[in-house]
Each structure stands twice: as C-alpha cells, then as structure tokens.
Image (cartoon, coloured by chain):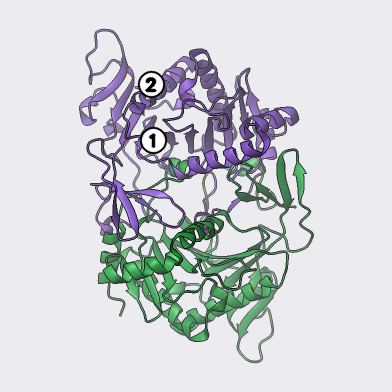
Chain colours: A green, B purple
Amino acid sequence: MPELRKDPIVGRWVIISTERGKRPSDFTGTEKRKEPRSCPFCPGNESLTPPEIVALRDQGTRPNTPGWRLRVISNKYPALKIEGDLNREAEGMFDRMNGIGAHEVVIETPDHYKDLVDLEVGEITQVMFAKRDRMADLKRDMRFKYVMVFKNQGEAAGASLEHSHSQLIATPVVPKRVQEEIEGSQKYFNYKERCVFCDIIRQELGSGIRVVAESEDFAAVTPFASRFPFEIWLLPKKHESNFLNISDRLMEEYSRLLKTVLTKLKLALSDPPYNYVLHTDTLSTIAREQYHWHLEIIPKLSRVAGFEWGTGFYINPVSPEDASAYLREIETK
Amino acid sequence: MPELRKDPIVGRWVIISTERGKRPSDFTGTEKRKEPRSCPFCPGNESLTPPEIVALRDQGTRPNTPGWRLRVISNKYPALKIEGDLNREAEGMFDRMNGIGAHEVVIETPDHYKDLVDLEVGEITQVMFAKRDRMADLKRDMRFKYVMVFKNQGEAAGASLEHSHSQLIATPVVPKRVQEEIEGSQKYFNYKERCVFCDIIRQELGSGIRVVAESEDFAAVTPFASRFPFEIWLLPKKHESNFLNISDRLMEEYSRLLKTVLTKLKLALSDPPYNYVLHTDTLSTIAREQYHWHLEIIPKLSRVAGFEWGTGFYINPVSPEDASAYLREIETK
C-alpha cells in the first residue's frame, strides 16, 4: 500500500509508493526509450490498459474497442489507490496516512504520431472538457482535497509513453506549492484587497514586455520571476479562482490560445519536451477572491542542478523579457 | 547585469542572469559531453581559470601553477557578480535588486579521474575545511545573508565539467527552502520547546529503520518523507545550527562518514550521479536553538516529472526504509 508522508519541518507531503518502484538494485540512472510499435495507447490495444472511465466514441462502437477520439483510463501503475480509508496515524513524531487517491490518464488522440500541439482547436477543447469533467466527478469523493492536472510531453520531461496523453491525480492533501500560492495570495489580499494575479495581469498587459500572446479573455506571459527559460503562464484575464467554473465559450478560447503558445514553443525551440501543470483552487472552495487559476508551462531546456532542488533557489539563464520577445515574433500561421 | 527577482506570490527569489545564457535559439534541449583532455581544472591549465583565491600547495610552488592539492577559484561564468550595490527597486508591483553575490568553485583534487568518494578521508577533510573557511570569509561581506554549498556529481546531476569540484554561492537573500526550514522548525520549537531535527535524530537512532550509517557524533538517515529514491541526510547528533561552528575533530569524523555514505551509494547504485547541498543557518545567526545544520544527498536516479516541479508534490518509488536497509548491507571495506 502506498503511503502519504509529511515532512515534519516544512510540511511537505509526499507519496511513498513502493509498488511503482523496482528493487533498489534496478536503479542505475539509465532509461530505455519505448518501442512505439507496442503502444498500449494505440487503437486496437485497448485491452492492454485498464478499462475506460469515459471516452469520446464514434456512434455504435463499444467501450474498450477502437472507434474513439479520446479515452480516459485509470493509470495502470497508479501512484495512489482509490479504495480504502485514509487511516491517519503516527509513527512516533511523524504523521502518515494511506495513499488514497485517483490517478487517471487522458489519451488525447488515437494517432500515435500526433502531439497535443498538432490537434485541431476543437480536439484540444475536447481534451480540456474531459479533464474538467473528470475533476468535477472526482470532487464528489469527499476524501479528496485537490486534483492535479498535468502533462509530461517527451521522455526528457518524464513521459514514459510517447503517445500523447495527460494525467490527473486526486489527493487527500493540498500540494505544497498550491498551498503556498494560496497563502501568499491571501497575504497580498489582506494588504491590498486585490488579487495578486489580477494585478500581475494588469501590469503585464500594460507594459507588454513579458506578453507572449493574448486573446480577448486570456493572457500568456513569461512571469517576472521565471524559474526556467521560456516558462509561460496562461491566465484568464477576468478573476476566477477555480478552473471548474470555466464556461464552454472560454474553454474553446483557452484551448485556442494554448495551441498558439505550444506552436510557438515548438517552432522556436525545435519541438522541446515540456511539462504543464494546472494551478487551480482546492476542491472544497467554489470561489475565492484572492486566488486565480492558471496553467504553468515549462519547457525542459536546461538541466536543473542539484542546489536548485536543495535550496529552492533557481538560476534562469534566459530573461523572461527576452523569451517573450522571441516567442512573440514567431508566426503560428 | 544579472538580477535577483522575487515572485510576488510565494516570495521566492530567483536570479535572472542573462550573461550566463545564450541566445534563445541556442536552446534545443540537447547537451554535449565535455572532452576530458581539455579540462581547465587539471594541473597545467591554471591559466584557463580565474586566479585562485586560496589553494593547498606543495612548498615552493607559485599560485596558479601546478603543485596544488586543492584550489578555490571564482566561477568563470558566475551566476552573481561580486562588485556593486544591491540597489533594491521596483518595477511596478515587482521587486528586484542587483544580482550581487559570490560564486566560487572548489577543485577538490588535481587528479582528473578521481571523484570525491575516491579521495582519502584526510583529503576530503581538507575539502570541507576549504568550504568552511570560504564561508567564514564571505560572511565578513555584510551584503551577504547566506552561502549555499553544493556539489553536482556527474553530467546528469548538472555538472558541466567532469573534474571533481563543488561550489559556493553567496547571496544577499536567504534561499526559500532554507527559510521554510527555519520557519517550520521555529513553529515546532514554539510548540515543543525542542529542536525538530534533534527529535528526528533521537527517533531514527532509536528505531534504526532508516539509519544508513552512523559514527559517534553523526548520523546518516533516509528521511521519513524522502522526496527521492535513496535521498540521505547527514546530521550532527549534538545540536548545532551552524556548520561554521564545527570543530576540527568533528570535521574529520564528518568527512569519514561522508566517504562511507558515498562509497555505499557508489557500490549500491553503480556510481550514480548525485547532488549534495549543505543546509546551514543564515550568516547573521551564530547559534539558534531550533535549527540544525545537515547535508542533503540526492542521487539522480529517477527523472522528475513535471507535476513535481509544478506542485511541490513528489512521488518517490523507493521507501526510505528499503533504501536504508539496502545501503546498510553494503560493506565499504
């Protein structure tokens, strides 16, 4: 059974999931590239994955057979288990609970050779709807406090399968980074009575120096204190703390701007590996004045040195102003 | 001029150092392995590095010529610059200051083919003394609040040169992770009137289940909430917040235990790349009841997926109990 464990010093929870792991002797620091021909995410191989939770299918096709345009399945090697009680308990001074949670995979296209960026805006919109709907469903499980939504694109970014997919992990704890953001934005709100993200958007759109792209309702910017080269945040211009509240119209606009940004990254940086992570409010909060959902996109360009892990102190070799200027110039049509 | 920038949401400072960077078009996600034969850290190539700050030399040899056993130099491509004023200023709602700091390199041995683990205990002790002495010297510069001491071993761990070396970065801000640790341990102290690290050491030595190795005055443990497989912390058993206060006798014992731990890692995991980061108190604090210096060692075994960056939520595929049991068994003689 995997476990959640809390660092007693900084309050960080981690999952201890030995079932995902190999024997210690299997760890040698090298990783093999997967063979595309045996891809479990390709049509015809549905039996190689856990059964689908939902799918977008051609009329008349049966679940777990070909004929789908998008499939959501449970992760075959989940970091957390869906069944059981949390059983919070102590080990001396330490706190632990069972690793209860959900770990799902969205297979974004049946085409093995298409990445998210290659899909039509309508198809990307369907991927985003699938995520929102899964989040809304997982929210009904009262054990869960948060759903992390993220994508690892490319082997260097942590993707173990090449076929385009993204993931959801529902957890009974709020991730540390999100908690920090909520607390930090609360402090700002206490002082200013304004949302810090709204203030950032206002200033960035005013100066334009870190704007990568924008649409009527969304802005893509390289953040002032970017940790990584070409780090990009995609934010709704109008205040909204929870991604779950997004309207159908905005979802399409959001997907369109995401495609634009990913296309710019692909053209500018030779199709880099990247990660994106959705930052949204906790499941129990419907709306909050001081928090603001956004998507963080981080191309995997520089190797992160050890002291960055150890100190939380990053060295970024490209200024966000240079990065956004470079990306602004890239024509996506 | 590089800049320090503070994320207005979570308070994280980063260095924006465009001079280290290349043009945006140079970033493509691939890195070349360095050629050992042109190593600037090898004896005879002293003119390829900035002049030495200190060195351990054979009698009668001149600075910046061969005949040294250990050399400390300024980093040729420093992340921070030593000259100038901090010039704290605003850009609208954002805060910035000049990237003032020191960035030094300790060349740990003249032998290109020896790693730290291959050195004699006496030689490792000299490396540690060199770091302590550089920290003590940098502390005299009142602009600096912290000195980060770390090592990147192996290309996958971020080392850009193969020749064994470690680094010091002095900064005018306290790194976020250290600040969090100090605040977290303060909270614990407020509640318990005990140092949280002392309590951890007491419990770990009592149970033994996460002890990798120990000596009279030091313990090496895999932390309860390890973020990474085979993550190891090396701590002094007796309370001490600041590495700068370490005695000569303890420095040798510390170096001996470090060699034991690194040897275990080398034998157990086929000479893995790794990072270590020293966590010690801020420069202005001589002693503090609630903080406790320690060294964090993180072998680079698993690729970190994007959501871990984005959420501060880690999945560790090896339990610390399994890791320490495995390492305990490894004979180092």
Place residue B46 in its image quadrant: top left
Give residue A65's position: percent from left, percent from top: 66, 80
Q: Is residue A160 above or below residue B230?
A: below
Give residue A137's position: percent from left, percent from top: 67, 75
- Name the one closer to the observer, A325 or B5: B5
In this picture, residue A120 sits left or right of residue B290: left
- Name the one closer to the observer, B315 or B313: B313
- The residue pinned by badge 2 equals B133
x 39%, y 35%: residue:
B145
Chain ID for label 1?
Answer: B
- The residue pinned by badge 1 equals B145
Q: Is residue A218 above or below residue A31?
A: below
Give residue A58's position: percent from left, percent from top: 60, 89
Q: Is residue B170 above or below residue A272?
A: above
Place residue B47 in its image quadrant: top left
The three-letter amino acid code for the residue at tag 2 is Asp
In this picture, residue A311 sits left or right of residue B83: right
In this picture, residue A328 sits left or right of residue A124: left
Label 1 or label 2, whichever comes before in sequence order: 2
In this picture, residue A333 sits left or right of residue A71: left
The three-letter amino acid code for the residue at tag 1 is Lys
Of tags 1 and 2, the one toward the viewer is: 1
Give residue A199's position: percent from left, percent from top: 39, 67
Dot 1 and dot 2 within a common chain: yes
Instruction: Please tell me the numbered disc located at residue A288.
Output: none
Label 1 vs label 2: CA separation? 16 Å
- Name the one closer to the observer, A262 or A65: A262
* Residue A66 seen in the figure: no
The kind of secondary structure element at disc 1 is: loop
x 45%, y 41%: residue:
A306
